[in-house]
Amino acid sequence: MKIAKETPVEDLVEEYPEAAGWMSRRGLRCVVCGEPFWGSLEELATEDGVVGDDFEKLITELQAFVDGVARVERKEVRVDRYEGAVSAPGTESGRDDEGNG
């Protein structure tokens, strides 16, 4: 996901739930009453006083965070080329310990 000032916070948090905690630790309250903030990253940052160079730095760091999460997720899923199944680490051919899958 490409992070930009126009990125809807709801879309970001839906695709990368870990981003909510990351932003919260940096003073951005992106989840209120269990619901993501309805607006763009720029709108959220402005409301929380993160503007100018601080906002640009935040976008750069958030992009690096999201890219790191995506890289880890790709490594955790293995494609079984012989059966075309997707399986989690530690399972064979997408089957669980009881042979389901």
Image: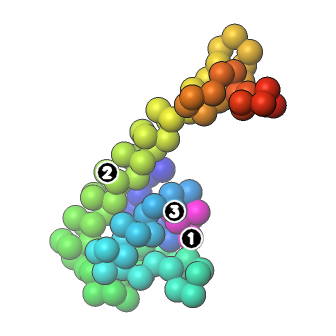
Whether the residues at callouts 1 and 2 have beta carbons within 8 Å, the answer is no
Write the start and end of the magenta stretch as one range: 10-14
Task: Check disc 1: other Cα within 10 Å, few if <14, some if 14-19, many if 20+.
Answer: many
Name which quarter of the figure residue 65 lies in: bottom left
Identify which residue, 36 or 52, lies in the foreground.
36
Which element carries disc 1, helix, strand or loop? Answer: helix
Is residue 99 toward the left or the right of residue 19 in the image? Answer: right
Identify which residue, 23 or 40, lies in the foreground.
23
**Residue farthest toward the right in the current orientation of the protein:** 100
Q: CA distance from mark 3 to mark 1?
A: 10 Å
Q: Which residue is mark 2?
A: 64
Q: Residue at x 46, y 78 (%)?
A: 30
* Residue 5 place in picture, x, y as percent: 39, 67
Q: Is residue 77 visible?
A: yes
Name which quarter of the figure residue 55 lies in: bottom left
Q: Residue at x 25, y 80 (%)?
A: 51
Task: Check disc 2: other Cα within 10 Å, few if <14, some if 14-19, many if 20+.
Answer: few
Q: CA distance from mark 3 to mark 2?
A: 15 Å
Q: Quadrant of the C terminus?
A: top right
Q: Which residue is mark 1?
A: 10
Task: Check disc 3: other Cα within 10 Å, few if <14, some if 14-19, many if 20+.
Answer: few
Q: Residue at x 52, y 86 (%)?
A: 32
Q: Is residue 53 above or below residue 18?
A: below
* Residue 99 place in picture, x, y as percent: 79, 26
